[in-house]
Image (cartoon, helix red, strand yellow):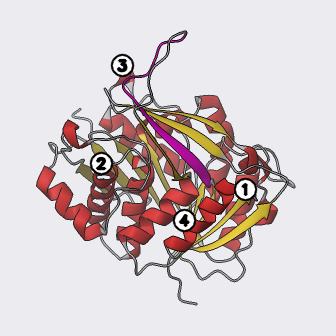
Amino acid sequence: MERNGFVTGGTWCVDYNMTLPHWPREETATRILSGSRQGGGSGCNFAVDMRRLAPEIPVSTIALCGDDSDGALLRAIAQEHGIDARFHVDPAVQTHRTMAFTARDNGRRTHLFQAESSDHLTPDHFDFRDSRAFMLHLGLPGTHALMDTPWRGDANGWVSVLRKARDAGLRTNLEVMTIERDALQALVLPCLRHLDYLVVNDYEIGALTGIETLPDGATLVPAVLRAARRALELGAMSLVVVHFPQGAVAVTRDGTVASQPSALVPKSAVAGTNGAGDAFAAGFFCGLHRGRDLGECLTYAHSSAAASLRSVDTYGAMEPIEACLTLAQGYGWREPLQVEDSV
């Protein structure tokens, strides 16, 4: 059976996006400069990004929401973007919502969330038997109470869903959330044997493998590469990609390494970083789906992330990949990465 497109699963939430002049200290107050209500979460962001980047690529999704206005908004977003949405609607729960704050002075984000519907998601909500998708994009461990716990003999529900997907012939990728190291290891390490791909950031790959990748808060690129290789040893992935502010590296099981510096996005163009990681992943897999080589896939990924930075929400600035590539080319690129150790 010829496979085409993607299915996303897991976190669909409503982001209440708020821009602040700066993040306030405790026992103080600050004004909200602007606000909006939009879809968020890895399942939503990847799906919408992919549809905007490459409308020829079909995308479906599996999620749980409440029978409330937030759930209606998520279903409308999926319909608007031509996503084949298989929402389980539970009137007994409230749709997952996130208060997504962005500080205007530095572009940093802070998320406070009420998981609600996400806490009630289980592997039983997932059925891939009639799916013709190329890959499942699943996330986010650490956000779903039942999925984060053991499930019918598996270490957690994420393992169960990944196993289902691979048994149905789909390839798999897991979106990871930046959480405390021990929790990340407990949730994600059991999943590695059921993954074909892993796309994470510099902190996440270091936390997962126990390799220090951010000494003194600065990314050590050779350590990132060592951690990516260690992750390959721990799992079944054919490919690991790690992104960080300066760029990204990709390493395959056969030893191929590719790297690409990130775009020189001017500070004046950055509205916020919310959703940039999802945009990076969508851009990378857009290139992979189109049969591009690893270097081109990383260029796709950085270009998508650069476009995403122009909006305070997760996907409002996303455009067709050709426009994103033109945008990044106009910004220019950082200096080439020093990937391997010099000694």
| Amino acid under disc 3 | Asp
| Amino acid under disc 2 | Arg
Give the Cα separation between the discs numbered 4 and 3.
41 Å
Residue 174 in sight from this viewpoint: no
User: Residue 68 shows which numbered tag?
Assistant: 1
| Amino acid under disc 1 | Asp
Magenta region = 12-26
For mark 2, what is the residue?
Answer: 310
On-image quarter of the C terminus: top left
- Give the mark nearest the N terminus, 3 or 1: 1
Query: Is residue 18 within the magenta segment?
Result: yes
Residue 171 rendering spot, x and y as whole percentages: 57, 70
Q: Is residue 54 above or below residue 208?
A: below
- Give the mark nearest the N terminus, 2 or 1: 1
**Outermost top residue:** 27
The local secondary structure at tag 2 comes to loop
User: Residue 77 shows which numbered tag?
Assistant: 4
The local secondary structure at tag 3 comes to helix
Q: Quadrant of residue 87?
A: bottom right
* Mark 2 nearby-residue class (10 Å; few <14, some 14–19, many ≥20): many
Query: Is mark 2 in CB contact (under 8 Å) with mark 3?
Result: no
Q: Nearer the viewer, residue 218 or 322?
A: 322
Give the Cα separation between the discs numbered 3 and 1.
45 Å
